Amino acid sequence: MIHNPVVGADGFMSEDMSPLAEHDLDPHLVEQLPTLPGTAVEFLRLCEDPTVGVKDVAAVAQRDPALLARIIQVANSPFYSPREPVSDVARASAILGLRSLKMIGVGFAILGDLWSTTSKSHALAGVIGASSMAGSAARSFSARVGTGRDEEALTAGLLSFLGELALLRCYPEAFNELWESEGHLPSAQAQREAMGADGVTVGVALLDRWKMPTSLRDGVLARRRSIDERLAPTPRVYEASLGFGTAIAELLTSGGAALERIRPAARRWGFDDDELLHYWGEFRLALRRTNQQMDLDVTSDLDAIVVEAKTEYLQSSVHASDELNRAQLEIEELRAENERLEGLSLQDPLTGIANRAAFNKFLRSSLASLQRVGGNVLVGVAMFDLDYFKQVNDSAGHLVGDELLKVMANAAHMSARQDELFARLGGDEFAMVMRPRSLQEMEAGIERVRGSMVAAAANTPGVPSATVTGGGALIRAVVGDLDSVETLLSTAADDALYSAKRGGRNNVHVTAVDGPGALSIVNG
C-alpha cells in the first residue's frame, strides 16, 4: 500500500505525511532501488564518528577517483580562494575543512553514482538540473539569511530529488514518457498514476533505508509541503533555505513563473525588488559553480532557464523599457561584482570576524615571513570546536545556535593578540594563526582564547552555556614548498584537536610537527 500525501493546487506536496516504510513500496520497485555507493557508506560512518580527522576522510576519497577529482575541483573554486592551484587531496582537505568535505563528499558520491549509471535522457538531465538548482538556491538563501549551514543546505538540496532519480532508474520508460508528454518535471500525482509511487515518498524511504543523517534528509522532507508553505516566513531559517531552494527548483522545472511567485515571499522576508534580483544573481552564480564542481554538462541549459525567468519577471513589471534595460545591465554588473567579491571577501557574514579566505591569507603570509627571516617567533595553527553544538541546535533552535556562535566568536576575536588572527572556518569550526615563542606559550594562548569563549557563553543572557575543545600545532622553521608546510601544519592541528576530543573534550592538546625537508621539530 502506498501512503498518498495531500497535494496542493500547484501539484506538489502539501501537509504532513506519514513516513513511508520500505515494505509499503511495490516489491518490484524495492528490488531495483539503488544501493548506497561504498564510498558514501564510509563517508557516513565518518560523519557519525566524532574522533575522525581530515586525513581519515581524505583517505576514503583517495579510493574513489571521481570523488577525489570533485573534491579537488571544489577546493579550487573561487569560494575557497586558493592562492595557487590545488592538485592533491591532502591540501584540498585542509582547505575545505572536515564538515564541508564530508557533506560535499556524501552528496556528490550519491548523485554522481546515479548520474553515471542511468541512461542519459531529457528527463535525467531535467531531474539532475532540478537537484542542482535546489542545492544552489538553498545555499544562496542560507548565505543571505546567515544560517551558518551553507554547505549543509547545498548537500541537502542536491539530494531533494533523489526519489525521482531512483524512479527514473527503476522505471525509465514510464518516467521518460511522462516527462516528454508534460514537457517538464511531472507532479507527484502524475508520478503516482504512472508508476505507483512519487519521488518524494520514494526519496524519504530510500534515505531512511540508507540510514542517512537527518540533516541530509531535510531537502526531501521539505518537499512534503506545498510551495506556498515552503515560501512562508519561519524563524527556522535553515528549514526556510531548503524550502526556498526546492520551491525554486520545482517552479523552474515545471514552467512556473518562479520570480513572480517568489516575490511576495521575498517581501515577507524583507527583500525588496532589488534584493530579490541580487539574490537571483547569487543563485545563478552558485548554480554555475555547483554544476562545474559536479562535472555536469547541463550548465548552459540551466543558465538559460534562470536568465529567462529573470527576463520574464522584469518584462512583467511596471518598469519602463529604459528601466528594464538598466536593470538587466545592473544584474550583469552585479554578476561580475559577485564573482570578484566571492574571491576577495575576507569577512564571515554571520559573526563578522575573519573567514576561511582571511585565515589562509594570514597563515601564508606568516609562513612566508618565517621562511625569509626565521628567528625566535614560531608559527602555529590552533583549531577550536564547540562541544556538542548539534545538540544546541536540536534543543534550542538554530537562531539560538547562531547567537551562541556570534557571542563566542566575538569573545575569541577580542582576546586574540595583535599578531594573531582568529577566524571562522564554517559551522562551529574556528581556527587561529599564532606566533608563540614555545609550545608552552602556544598551549597557554589556546587556553586563553578557549576560556574567553566558554566564559562569554556562560555570562551572556539568552544563550546556553557551552564548552570548547582546542588543538594546535606549530613549527620553528620553514624550508621549501609553502603549500606542503601549510597542509602539514593544518592537518597536524586538526589531528591535535581530535586527540583533545578523545581525551574528554573541554580541554587543549598541542603538538610540534616535523616533515622531511620542510619542517624542524620544536623542542619544549
Image (spheres, grey):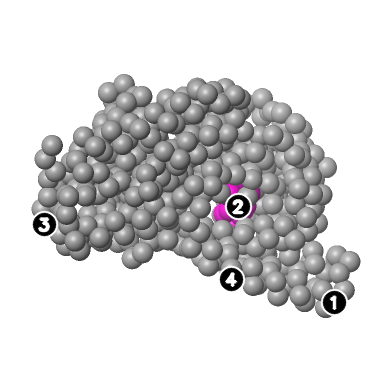
Name which residue lies at 75% across and 71% down: 327
Res 487 visible: yes
Which residue position is annotated with label 1? 321
Looking at the image, which is closer to me, 334 or 60? 334
Taking the image as shown, residue 178 lies to the left or right of residue 91, namely right
Dot 2 falls on a residue whose secondary structure is: helix
| Type of amino acid under label 4 | Ala
Q: CA distance from mark 2 to mark 4?
A: 16 Å
Mark 4, other Cα within 10 Å: few <14 / some 14–19 / many ≥20? some
Which residue position is annotated with label 2? 140
Instruction: Name which of mark 3 and mark 4 comes first in the sequence.
Output: 4
Find out whether residue 481 is within the magenta segment.
no
Which residue position is annotated with label 3? 517
Q: CA distance from mark 3 to mark 2?
A: 43 Å
* Quarter location, residue 132: bottom right
Disc 3 vs disc 1: which is toward the camera?
Answer: 3
Disc 2 vs disc 4: which is toward the camera?
Answer: 4
Instruction: Name which of mark 2 and mark 1 comes first in the sequence.
Output: 2
Give the main secondary structure, helix, strand or loop, of the magenta stretch: helix
User: Are the residues at dot 3 and dot 2 in contact (C-beta closer than 8 Å)?
Assistant: no
Which residue position is annotated with label 4? 336
Disc 3 vs disc 2: which is toward the camera?
Answer: 3
User: Are the residues at dot 2 and dot 4 in contact (C-beta closer than 8 Å)?
Assistant: no
